[in-house]
């Protein structure tokens, strides 16, 4: 298999991702999955505290033309803020395009899985117009705790 992978790199270098995702290649379309951990106690890709109000890049970039087919977020540690009014939203290309801003007193305040807008149906898929960094936005109030894993499945044609 290693010999075949080397051959693919030489023949079709455009199949190789510049940054971050695990991929599976079939014919002319590659199905990939990108995942990132968002921890309110850690720093974002720009070195800013994830707990602060603002947009926090996750350091995972999806390529131009990627089509997001499915997304979900697993809350591992419930998100909290001083008055439980902080909101969390997830985007790839524009505000709320993966997960609409929701107060931590709701779904983000409990452990478990949360479905993104992209659920595998064609009408909910998102086609990227440029290379984009997956981003989680915190608004209204700073986070005091919370940790989760974002998983995005996408396809990339040639």
Image: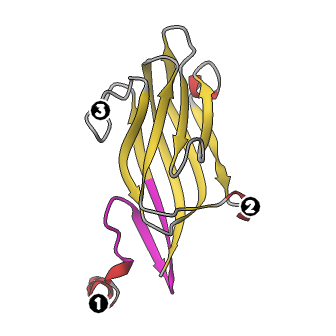
Q: Residue at x 56, y 42 (%)?
A: 95
Q: Is residue 120 left or right of residue 39?
A: right
- Label 3: which secondary element: loop
On the image, the x and y values in percent for residue 123 come to: 74, 61
Q: Is residue 1 left or right of residue 25?
A: left
- Label 2: which secondary element: helix
Q: Residue at x 48, y 9 (%)?
A: 82
Quadrant where the image shows the N terminus? bottom left
Answer with mark 1 or mark 2, whichever residue precedes in sequence.
1
On the image, the x and y values in percent for residue 7 come to: 29, 90
Give neighbour class at mark 1: few <14, some 14-19, many 20+ (Cα, 10 Å): few
Q: CA distance from mark 1 to mark 3?
A: 38 Å
Q: Which residues are magenta?
A: 15-34
Q: Which residue is mark 1?
A: 7
Nearest the viewer among 102 and 3 is: 102
Q: Is residue 37 shown to the viewer in this render? A: yes
Q: CA distance from mark 1 to mark 2?
A: 36 Å
Q: Is residue 97 left or right of residue 146?
A: right
On the image, the x and y values in percent for residue 30 come to: 49, 75
Q: What number of labels is visible? A: 3
Q: State which quadrant residue 54 falls in.
A: top left
Q: Which residue is mark 3?
A: 43
How is colour applied across the structure in the image? secondary structure
- Label 1: which secondary element: helix
Q: Which residue is mark 2?
A: 123
On the image, the x and y values in percent for residue 131 come to: 41, 61
Q: Residue at x 62, y 28 (%)?
A: 102
Q: Do callouts 1 and 2 mark residues in contact (Cβ within 8 Å)? A: no
Answer with mark 1 or mark 3, whichever residue precedes in sequence.
1
């Amino acid at each position: 298999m290693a010999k075949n992978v080397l051959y693919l790199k030489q023949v079709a270098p455009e199949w190789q991702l510049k940054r971050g995702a695990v991929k599976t290649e079939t014919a002319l379309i590659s199905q990939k999955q990108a995942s990132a951990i968002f921890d309110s106690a850690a720093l974002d890709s720009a070195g800013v505290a994830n707990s602060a109000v603002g947009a926090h890049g996750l350091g995972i970039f999806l390529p131009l033309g990627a089509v997001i087919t499915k997304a979900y977020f697993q809350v591992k540690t419930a998100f909290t803020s001083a008055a439980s009014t902080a909101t969390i939203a997830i985007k790839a290309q524009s505000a709320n395009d993966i997960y609409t801003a929701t107060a931590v007193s709701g779904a983000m305040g409990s452990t478990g899985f949360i479905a993104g807008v992209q659920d595998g149906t064609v009408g909910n898929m998102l086609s990227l117009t440029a290379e984009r960094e997956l981003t989680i936005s915190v608004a209204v109030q700073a986070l005091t705790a919370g940790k989760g894993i974002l998983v995005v499945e996408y396809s990339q044609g040639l």
